[in-house]
Amino acid sequence: MEPQALSEEGESDAYDPPSPSEGEHTEGEYVPIEDSSNPPEDQSPAECVTSKPEALPAVYPMPADSWKTLIEHIEFNPITSYTHLDQPYHKYGCWTHRKEYKELLYQEYRDKANQHEIQARRLQDNYVQTPEIQDSSQAPEEGSPPPIERRRTDSTFSRLSSSVSGFNLWQDLPEIKSSSVLSLLQPGEIKLQEAMFELVTSEASYYKSLRLLVSHFMESERLRSTLNPSEIHFIFSNVIEVLATSERFLLDLEQRFEENIVISDVCDIVYQHAANHFGVYVTYVCNQTYQERMYRKLLQERTDFRDALGQLELDPVCRGLPFSSFLILPFQRITRLKLLVQNILTKVEEGSEREASALQAHQELEKLVRACNDGVRKMSRTEQLISIEKTLEFKIKSVPIISHSRWLLKQGELQQMSGPRTSRTLRTKKLFRSVYLFLFNDLLLLCKRLAGDRYQVFDSAARGLLRVEELEDQGQTLANVFILKLLENAHEREFTYMLKATSQSEMKRWMTSLVPNRRTKFFSITSKLLDCPQVQCVHPHIAQEPDELTLDLADILNVLDKTDDGWIFGERLHDQEKGWFPNTVAEEIMNRDIRTQNLKECFRVHKCDDSSQNKDRRKMGSRTRQ
């Protein structure tokens, strides 16, 4: 396998589908989100999802030089390419004197893939029509052509899909085109093949970018001369082990592809590697905090390091991408791999062996992603608690702040209403006084702000003993005021505070953080509601506060609440994480069928996770009783 030649899904000629008489799907384009609302009339919806395993064609083994042939037919837009890796990869290191091709680095692949997903959903949102319930007497006769309006819509959608598809397709491979495979497969099975093919080619693109990090940056003599061994370790961590893991994974995927051009499965390979080898990703990601800190320090203090790095980044092989974009590749890949498996899972037949394999792989990847996230947060959270504790002094009985099971959720200043709610009080200048809140996952501290960034704690309560209530509109003075009730405060009695925020979004964000399970304007997906407002992310968003949600392009979220001043509280479908984000980074999905399909796919992906979590809870309860 030649990493220089095998690229990610980049620009390619649109797929020219066979004529309908050959039994092919007339649209012929792979779109990440299926339209299941209008299945062919002679098929049931289940048949449109995928073909049955026994319906797969006979084995079509590829020639011995098949992988090289595959690589040569991926990305055939001639431009300058990266072909001078210091060390040859595997058995294909001799491929240095070949025609140069446009090759996407993994960072470019992710952007293109996400933009493609966004455009595909936009097309479906605009052109997929909600099926109307027709009277049986008006149903078209069997074999008759579809109505003019439907034909125009379908052809328009197909044409526009082709225009935004910039990826190499499995069905475009010469071996596929020259065989009779496409005429034997259902459209759903072709989409499944495309999903598995994407996992293979994206891993190759990731491997190429990772090798570039090692060969171009880590092995640069000029860069290494500016660093001592300890600094090299902090910056590059165990990237060599991560690279070897990717190579091993890619070789197994290559072997599977060479067995049959109709890929039987890839999720079983994903599971084996995730369970036995992908632990190196957790090690790398957990060192990310040290890595970022050392990187910033070197940029600020070492001119020679900064100059050497800048010169390396200017090399055409980096395609204008910064060094930092290479350092975060492993975390991006393990997250993306989980999403690729989810995509496969939505296309396999329910109850099949391939579904079981995909669920198993998804569960293992979910554990890895969770371990990565927990590892990154653990050190930063502990440091944050130590920093906060140094600023506190207690007017009440002191509360120990530092705990391995505690972290900060939100902090900030609000205005506390003082005195009784009377007309006389409303006319006084001291209607409100400042109060500073530290909200942890299990504890609330109410403080008075002192000079020098210090805080005096005058009340506290367990987070589980908090209740909030929004006041009805009572004029400008009481706008954005809410009631915070402590069922048991530091003096072991119930106490109520009236707190005023500077805006509606700040008020709602505090209320959501203080009492996370309160009823919101819209329902969570856990309510099993079949329709709910949804948005997709069209601009990346980096969380600035703990209650915000970092969003990647093409993320789909259920809208749980929104404010008049431009903020949305949402729940991301692929991992069910909740948080706030500005409405300017997302656009609403208007088509009800697409929203319903997104929810169904979400339920299908997470149903196995829910059942396994319930099983773990039962085991824990059994041990407790014993």
Image (spheres, rainbow, N blue to C red):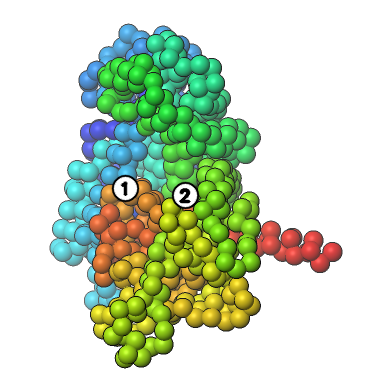
Kind of residue indicated by mark 1:
Pro
- C-alpha distance separating marks 1 and 2: 21 Å
User: In which quadrant will I find the C terminus?
Assistant: bottom right
The residue where tag 1 is placed is: 540
Q: Is residue 465 above or below residue 296?
A: below
Residue 564 percent across, percent down from the top left = 26, 70
Q: Residue furthest bottom?
A: 423
Determine whether 125 is above or below 260 in the image: below
Q: Do the residues under discs 1 and 2 have CB atoms within 8 angstroms?
A: no
Foreground of the two, 294 or 373: 294
| Picture residue at 63% right of the left edge, 35% below the top | 276
Residue nearest the viewer, comparing 127 with 567: 567
Disc 2 crowd, CA 10 A, few/some/many (<14, 14-19, 20+): many
Name the amino acid, label 2: Gln
Instruction: Give the structural element (helix, strand or loop) at label 1.
Output: loop
The residue lying at 39 percent from left, 78 percent from top is 417
Decide: few, some or many residues near mark 1? Use Cα within 10 Å; few <14, some 14-19, many ≥20: some
- Where on the picture, by quarter, is residue 415? bottom left
Answer whether residue 120 is visible to the viewer in this image. no
Looking at the image, tell me whether mark 1 or mark 2 is earlier in sequence order: 2
Q: Which mark is residue 342?
A: 2
Q: Residue furthest right?
A: 626
> Tag 2's secondary structure?
helix
Res 453 visible: yes
Which of pointers 1 and 2 indicates the residue nearer the eye?
1
